[in-house]
Image (cartoon, rainbow, N blue to C red):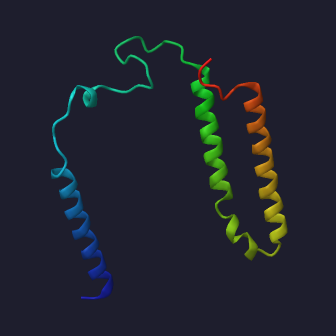
């Protein structure tokens, strides 16, 4: 039996054991709160055509924007191995400055205030 077959066998056995344990170990006593659906604070049995708060949408978009920022800046520590690391670091600085200025603008406009 070669090494690859052994590793695949161990991985499959371990994943099956963990899947079985995670299915049988938790307590199966759901209460009314766990069984109720969660729809971002809306009544799930009411009309689906009710308008929602624009502030909720804005916070969601800001979360996605800063999540994208992290994804763009994640390879930056390896930027010093490029042929021109100064260019990569200056682009990263430009992105960070632009996002910081946008955040300051949103803050000054009151867009981050959840409650009025």
* Residue pictured at 20% horizontal, 34% vertical: 30
State which quarter of the image contains the N terminus.
Answer: bottom left
Could you tell me residue 18's position as x and y percent? 23, 61
Could you tell me residue 54's position as x and y percent? 61, 21
Could you tell me residue 49's position as x and y percent? 48, 13
In the displayed structure image, the side of residue 30 where residue 69 appears, left or right: right
State which quarter of the image contains the C terminus.
Answer: top right
Along the line of sight, the residue nearer the viewer: 31 or 85: 31
In terms of image quadrants, where is residue 83? Answer: bottom right
Along the line of sight, the residue nearer the viewer: 86 or 4: 86
In terms of image quadrants, where is residue 52? Answer: top right
In the displayed structure image, the side of residue 82 where residue 62 appears, left or right: left
* Residue pictured at 29% horizontal, 75% vertical: 8
- In this rendering, the count of numbered labels is 0
Along the line of sight, the residue nearer the viewer: 75 or 104: 104
Along the line of sight, the residue nearer the viewer: 92 or 8: 92
In terms of image quadrants, where is residue 65? Answer: top right
* Residue pictured at 76% horizontal, 44% vertical: 100
Could you tell me residue 51's position as x and y percent? 54, 14
In the displayed structure image, the side of residue 85 where residue 16 appears, left or right: left
In the rendered view, tell whether residue 2 sits above or below residue 112: below
In the rendered view, tell whether residue 97 sits above or below residue 47: below
In the rendered view, tell whether residue 70 sits above or below residue 44: below
């Amino acid at each position: 039996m070669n090494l690859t077959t052994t590793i695949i066998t161990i991985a499959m056995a371990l994943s099956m054991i963990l899947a079985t344990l995670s299915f049988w170990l938790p307590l199966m006593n759901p209460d009314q709160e766990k069984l109720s659906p969660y729809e971002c604070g809306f009544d799930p049995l009411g009309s689906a055509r009710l308008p929602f708060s624009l502030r909720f949408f804005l916070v969601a978009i800001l979360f996605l924007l800063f999540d994208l920022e992290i994804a763009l800046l994640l390879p930056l520590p390896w930027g010093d191995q490029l042929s021109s690391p100064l260019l990569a670091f200056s682009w990263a600085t430009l992105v960070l400055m632009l996002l910081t200025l946008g955040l300051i603008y949103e803050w000054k406009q009151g867009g981050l205030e959840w409650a009025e």
